[in-house]
């Protein structure tokens, strides 16, 4: 349970971070992607093809030429979808930006905040 | 009629910079608040006590040295029962020292506070802050 002071500081930090361009653009891109049925369909197709290929390879089989060709077409369709690409760019931007912010927290704290919050698998 | 004063390109460029500066300033304030917390003070005190405890330092070094010696075997999963028992004995001896136990507990307690703050921040920004706050991902 966080103390009131720490909770308020975290909420204020999150609120300010939410207004930073990289985060704001990411949120807009994520919402737009979520609301776009065409993009969602393409991503669902891609996941399905990836799953099929992975299952084929796990079974020790070589994917057929037809499977590979369908995967290529699916990937090309995803790459050609501006909504998905905008989301991808925004994701890359935010993933570059957040570590710089975490380093600022670490500098004020005097300890590596990113390591302290890293998922236990890390 | 449009208020053209709001269309000044300099203003448009300044807004994101101001938002970014505000986020960095809030990051600094947040870090300072964490530093002022009782959990961090306890961790610092535990660190000082640990550094001043020669028995603790010796026990940590003994465990670390044996662990380094057996790293390859441990990675390959070929530790013998005797080697495993040796590591466990050294680890147990290390954790039995009060300053070590206090330091471990203080680290865990402060880590839990930090992880909880990351959950608060993630909820605000809509992306997992903990998993994305290290360059190259959480394992980077």
Image (spheres, helix red, strand yellow):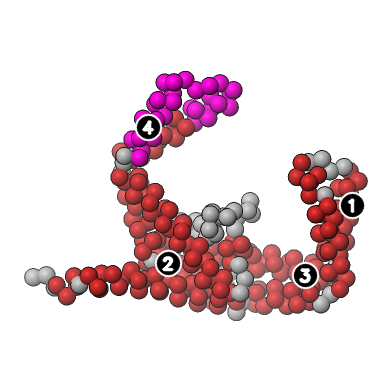
Q: CA distance from mark 4 to mark 3?
A: 55 Å
SS of the residue under disc 1: helix
Q: Is residue A44 above or below residue B9?
A: above
Q: Which mark is residue A33?
A: none
The chain under label 1 reads: B
- Which quarter of the figure is the N terminus of chain B placed in? bottom left
N-term mark: 4 or 2: 2
- Label 1 in the same subunit as label 2: no
Residue at screen point 51% across, 57% down: B132
Q: For the residues carrying marks 4 and 3, which lies nearer the camera in this image?
A: 4
Q: Measuring 88% from the left and 47% from the top, which residue is drawn there? A: B83
Gap in angstroms between the C-alphas marked 1 and 2 = 48 Å
Quadrant in the picture for the C terminus of chain B: bottom right
SS for callout 2 = helix
B17 or B28: nearer the viewer? B17
Residue wearing tag 4: A74
Indicate which disc, 3 or 1, sits on the residue closer to the N terminus: 1
């Amino acid at each position: 349970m966080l103390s009131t002071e720490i909770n308020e500081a975290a909420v204020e930090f999150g609120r300010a971070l939410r207004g930073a361009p990289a985060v704001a653009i990411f949120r807009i891109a994520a919402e737009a992607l979520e609301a776009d049925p065409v993009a969602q369909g393409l991503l669902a197709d891609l996941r399905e093809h990836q799953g099929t290929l992975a299952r084929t390879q796990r079974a020790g089989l070589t994917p057929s030429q037809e499977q590979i060709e369908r995967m290529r077409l699916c990937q090309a369709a995803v790459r050609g979808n501006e909504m998905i690409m905008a989301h991808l760019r925004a994701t890359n931007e935010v993933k570059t930006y957040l570590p710089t912010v975490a380093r600022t927290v670490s500098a004020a704290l005097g300890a590596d905040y990113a390591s302290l919050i890293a998922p236990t698998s890390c | 009629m449009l208020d053209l004063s709001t269309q000044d390109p300099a203003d448009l460029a300044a807004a994101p910079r101001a938002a970014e500066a505000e986020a960095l300033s809030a990051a600094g304030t947040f870090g300072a608040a964490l530093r002022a917390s009782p959990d961090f003070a306890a961790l610092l005190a535990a660190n000082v006590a640990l550094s001043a405890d020669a028995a603790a330092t010796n026990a940590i070094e003994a465990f670390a040295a044996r662990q380094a010696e057996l790293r390859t075997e441990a990675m390959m999963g070929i530790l013998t029962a005797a080697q495993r028992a040796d590591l466990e004995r050294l680890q147990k001896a290390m954790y039995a020292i009060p300053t070590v136990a206090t330091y471990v507990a203080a680290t865990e307690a402060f880590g839990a506070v930090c992880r909880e703050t990351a959950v608060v921040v993630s909820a605000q920004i809509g992306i997992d802050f903990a998993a994305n706050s290290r360059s190259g991902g959480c394992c980077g």
